[in-house]
Every structure is written in C-alpha cells, then in structure tokens.
Image: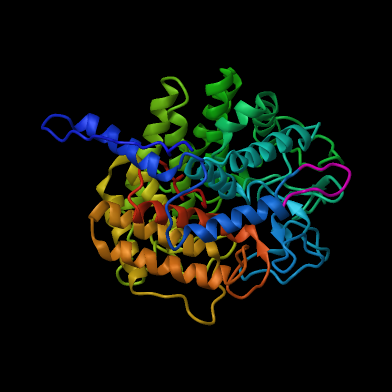
Amino acid sequence: MNKPAQFRIRLSFHKGNAPRRAVLFSLLFAFLAVSCNGAEVPSSPFLGAVYRYADAVLQHGRDTFGPQKSNLFLSALDRGTLGPLSHRPPAPAGVREGDRVGVAPGPLLGANPQHDENLLRLLYTLTALSGKREYADAADAELKWFLENTRSPGTGLLPWGEHMSWNVMTDEPIPGQQSSDSAAMHEFARPWMLWDRCFELAPEASHQFALGLWEHQVADHKTGAFDRHAAFREHAPRDGMDFPRHGGFYIRTWAVDYSHTKDPTMLRAIETLLERFEKKRHPQTGLIEHRSEDPHGIPASSLSLAIDCDAAARCVPQPLSSRLRTFASREDEVFCRLPHDLKGRGGFVATVEKATGKPVGDSTPLWEARYGSCTTTQVAMMCVARYENTGKTGYRDLIVQAADAYLKSTPPEDQDVWPMTFGHAISLQLAAWRHTARVEYLDFARQLGSLAVEKFWQDNPLPRASLKTEHYESITGADSLALALVELHLSILHITAVNCPSNTIDR
C-alpha cells in the first residue's frame, strides 16, 4: 500500500522577507481550506448551516417542472417538503404582496435571480472553500439560462427585480406589482454585482439587456406596445420615478457593459443619467431629491448611487471616470455631515428636507425591515462599502457608532425580524472589529451568528423567511445571512486565502 503523501512547508521569517511570508501564509491557509480531495474545509459553528442550505437548494430547490427544465432556483420553498409551495403563506412583515414570486392569491412558484443574488455569490464562494465545482456550476447554469431564455424580445429586459419573476411551472413571466395601465414594471431590487460573470457566460444576451435598459427605461422615444411574452413596460423617460439608487444600478450596468463591449452607447447612457442627477443637487445643501418635485431626500438612496458611481468610474475612460468620482465624493461630504444620531437614537437620518438639510420623521430602525426603508445596519453596510473604497474617516466613525448601537440591542420578542437584518448586523460587527481591533465586536458577531442559526434554521436545512413565518422565501435575505455566516467563519479561523464577497448589496 502506498503511504499517504506528506507535505512540509518551510516558512522563512528573517527580516525583509514580508512579501514572501505573506504569499506562504496564503498558500498555507489555502492548503488548510481545501484538502487533497477538494472536499474538506475547517469546521466552525456556522459553516454547517450554510452548506446544508446550499445543498438543499441544489438538490430540491431547482426548476425541474413545466415544459422547460431550467434548473433556476425557486425563490420560495416549503420547509417541510423542501419542494415548491402549494399555497401562499402569509408574507413576512414589511413585504408587499405584489413583490413576491407569484401572482396573488396563487402559490409562490417563481424564480427571481435578484432575490437570490447573494445565494449565487455564496455558491461561488463555497466552491472556492470546498473545491466542489457543483456549487459554481449551478450558479453558472442559472445565469446562462435566465439571460438567454427569459428576455423580452421587444425590449431585451428581464423578468426579475423588485416587481417581476419567472414562473417555473408555466415558463412565463410573473408580472407582480401592477401599474395603473396594467403593464408590469421592470425595476432592479438590488445592484447586480454579477455582470462580469454574465458577460463571460452569455455576452450577447447581457449586452442586449444593457441596451434595453437604455432604450426602454431612459432614452427618449414614443411609448411602445406591450409584449405579452414578458409584459415589460416600454415608456418615455420616467423622470418622476428617477430614484437615485436605481440610477446607480443602471450606471453600474452600463459601465460594466462598456468594459466588455466598448460600445459608445453605454458612455452616452451614463453621461445622460449622471447629468440628470447632477442637476438634481440642491445648490446650497447638496442634497438630491428622492424623486422629481419631491421636497425631500432619502440619504441612503443617494449614498447607494455614490457607491455605484465610484465602481463605474473604474470601468470607463476619462473624463467620464473623474466626473463619476467627483459626484461620489460630493455625496460623501453631504452624507457624512448630516446629523446622524447613532449614539442617542440608534439610527441614521432617514429622510431630510432638500432645501434645509433638516431631518424629517424617525431615524432608521435597528431591527424592523420593510419595503421602502432601510434598517440602521443596512445603511451602516453602505458606509462600510464607502470606507473600504475611500478611507474617509467620517464613514469609519459612523460604522463604529452603528456597531455600538447594536451592542446594546437585541430583537424585540414581538417583532418579525428578517434574516437579512441579522446578516447585516453580523457583517457590521465584523467590519467594526477589522477597523478597531476591539474584540467585543467579534464576540458579538459570534453571538448573533449562533442566535441566527438557532432562530432561522432550527433543525431544517432551509432558513425561515422571518422569525414569525415557517416557509423559505429569499426576498427577506436568507442569502445575505448565509453570506455573513461564511464571513464570520473565515474571520474566526483567520482564513485569508478565500475572499468572501462584501455583504453590501442590499441597498
């Protein structure tokens, strides 16, 4: 019998060898994270729940129904059968019926890749951790099939996002929230961070979507007919619906498209939308209106736009690149000088008068998630994104203050909390720990992680949609919680050879 191979790693610690030492440590952690068989990973109290979740959706939660067996991930599942829901359970608190993956009052039988975006990012990370290709292969299969088979032939747009999804039983779009003219509305739910992978898997389909986003949601043209295949709204410019966060999602999409295609149309699209938001800034306060002719601003929405403008600047040529960075930097100044009372009220300024900068209404809540607003930890994770991209200390101070607010708080027993909120709270504590080295933040992240596994997973491989529901529904961010648990696992074991995607897309 052959003896098992033995490995010896010699580390040199003499002075002046820091770069080599860093490389050797990375190799060592990579070896510890992935065994020779490509299957074993270090244990932690949290990674088991994540793998059970991923394995359950791969084995039981994919589309093998209807005429087309797409293998898309169902965005809602029965935790008892681990299969499709045969009914429509009550929505978690804060979720609108029209945004769920199924037409009311029917069952939830839809797939919405934007609801599952962090699940897809999680699967790529699990392949890096375990060496098992089936996780990344499943994510690739979803992206490729969805892009190539569900786009509207009339607009190139996709049935996903805030209002639409794909019916896995009938292989047609689910309109979701209806507008006054009974046409379905295409809107992003999150920024789409997987465009680079999409262009690798389905370049033409990805480009056609980016063009459709410009031609049918921004560019001037006459209102067109509606396409029954996807019922996507085609319309003249909806300047009255120009929410800053959506503008950022568009700009980021066009920038990545340009980096792959060099299509000058994408630069024109970015310039057009950027100019529109530049004109919306108040000359004295610098605040941007939430929508046209609205006297109020939503700081979190504008901050989200800044994050995407900064990312887009890396993909486009000068002078547009500098213009995008200048816009983002101006937003940094505006946001950081607002009177966020995290120490007293535990929240960020949620709404503000555009002309005066005066806060209006309540601050962001700690645990209560709902459509149309952000929790404190959601906004704090945007601050994490900006701090780690700019190094501006104003954001670091806000991160620490927000983390401190959660150290003093636990979810009320009578509140229906989302898994997304737990995920953000864990990631926020880890960010505060990274930037202060104060161990209480890491300790509290571990406490939150243990509580999350206990409350959401219980003895089931699928996490609950909320603390007051018993089904799985990804609109409430189970994928963000799972991603946070992977981040926590890597932090506890000090594994640096595998990067966990930043948990900052829920904005």
Residue 363 in sight = no
Q: How is the image coloured?
A: rainbow
Q: Is residue 88 magenta?
A: no
Relative to 137, is 367 on the left or the right?
Answer: left
**Residue found at the very far left of the displayed protein:** 15
Relative to 483, is 391 on the left or the right?
Answer: left
Q: Quadrant of residue 25?
A: top left
**Of residues 132 and 416, the one drawn nearer to the viewer in this rendering:** 132
Q: Quadrant of residue 225?
A: top right
Magenta residues, start to end: 61-70
How far from the left and from the top, in percent, is residue 20?
A: 24, 29
Residue 431 in sight = yes
How far from the left and from the top, in percent, is residue 246?
A: 57, 44
Q: Is residue 127 above or below residue 371?
A: above
How far from the left and from the top, in percent, is residue 425?
A: 42, 62
**Of residues 98 and 32, the one drawn nearer to the viewer in this rendering:** 32
Q: Main secondary structure of the magenta part?
A: loop
Relative to 449, is 272 on the left or the right?
Answer: right
